[in-house]
Amino acid sequence: MIDWSRIETVFLDMDGTLLDLHFDNYFWREYVPERYAVTHNLDVNAAKTLLFPMFQKVEGSMDWYCIDYWSRELRLDIAELKRDIRHLIRIRPHTIEFLDFLRQSGHRLVLVTNAHSKSLSLKMEKTQLEGHFDRLVCAHDFGVPKEDVTFWDKLKTVEAFESSATLMIDDSIPVLESAKNYGIKYLLAVAWPDLKSEKRNVTEFDSIHCFSEIIPDKGKAK
């Protein structure tokens, strides 16, 4: 159980942390290849063979998270395609309960995401989570992803925080490593970001499968 009395600010990732990563995994692994195949008159498997190395090449960079970049590269309206399957956007179990607990206990809540602003807007529209946060931060506004340690200095220009009293929760190990290298003291990994995939074995950081594990009353009940 986290000692919440030592934490002032909580940084929360969006995809795979607050929201089920299944939407994004399905979108890039299945839906985009399907639409790309139709647009370019290809077999779906041929489309995947072509697209997946393209994705891997820029993974973790700002381009990887950029809707406009992929719209240009693939000649598809990525923002509109995301809207096509927005019914798959889902809040992870106990997320609202966890956010309510943090708010009631006086913590500052900041959503910190690499997602493009168009994706962020769509997901906030679908989930209505925005009102739970003191601030929404999009890495695209800084030009570097959370994986880059310089991101945290840029974040400090808009959001004052003490590294020694900040908790970062994210499903991405590279992001957590970046936060650790910057000096953020409290780090927690989400080990089950895609609820339709198998749980991961995370060894690099303390981890949870569900927010219910770190809500004090629920923790006591176990």
Image (spheres, rainbow, N blue to C red):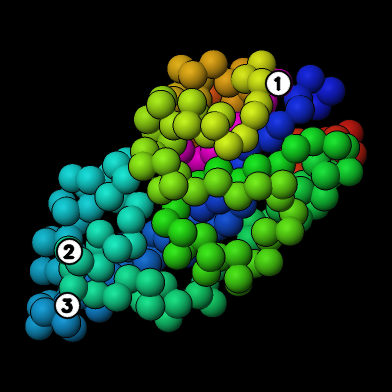
Q: Which label was assigned to residue 37?
A: 3
Count of picture labels: 3
The structure residue drawn at horizontal position 66% and vertical position 16%, both measured from the top left corner, is 164
The x and y percentages for residue 210 are 67, 45
User: Can the viewer see residue 206 in this picture?
Assistant: no
Secondary structure of residue under mark 2:
helix
Is 185 situated left or right of 70 in this image? Answer: right
Start and end of the magenta stretch?
A: 165-173
Q: Would you say 171 lies left or right of 6 here?
A: left
Q: Earlier in the sequence, mark 1 or mark 2?
A: 2
Q: Which mark is residue 73?
A: 2
Q: CA distance from mark 2 to mark 3?
A: 14 Å
Above or below 198: residue 202: above
Task: Locate residue 58: give its quadrant.
Answer: top left
For label 1, count other residues whose C-alpha is less than 10 Å away and answer few (under 14), some (14-19) or many (20+): some
Mark 2 or mark 3, earlier in chain: 3
User: Does residue 100 lie above or below 86 as drawn?
Assistant: above
Residue identifier under label 1: 165
Q: Which mark is residue 185?
A: none
* In magenta stretch: residue 63: no
Q: As shown in the figure, which amino acid type bears the numbered disc 1?
A: Ala
Q: State how far apart marks 3 and 1 are (Cα).
A: 49 Å
How far across and how far down the image is residue 119, in percent? 46, 63
* Quarter occupied by the N terminus: top right
Going 49% across and 48% down the picture, which residue do you hit? 138
> The disc labelled 3 sits on which kind of residue?
Ala
Q: Earlier in the sequence, mark 3 or mark 1?
A: 3
Name above or below for residue 61 compared with residue 75: above
Identify the residue shown where x is 37% and y is 30%.
Answer: 148
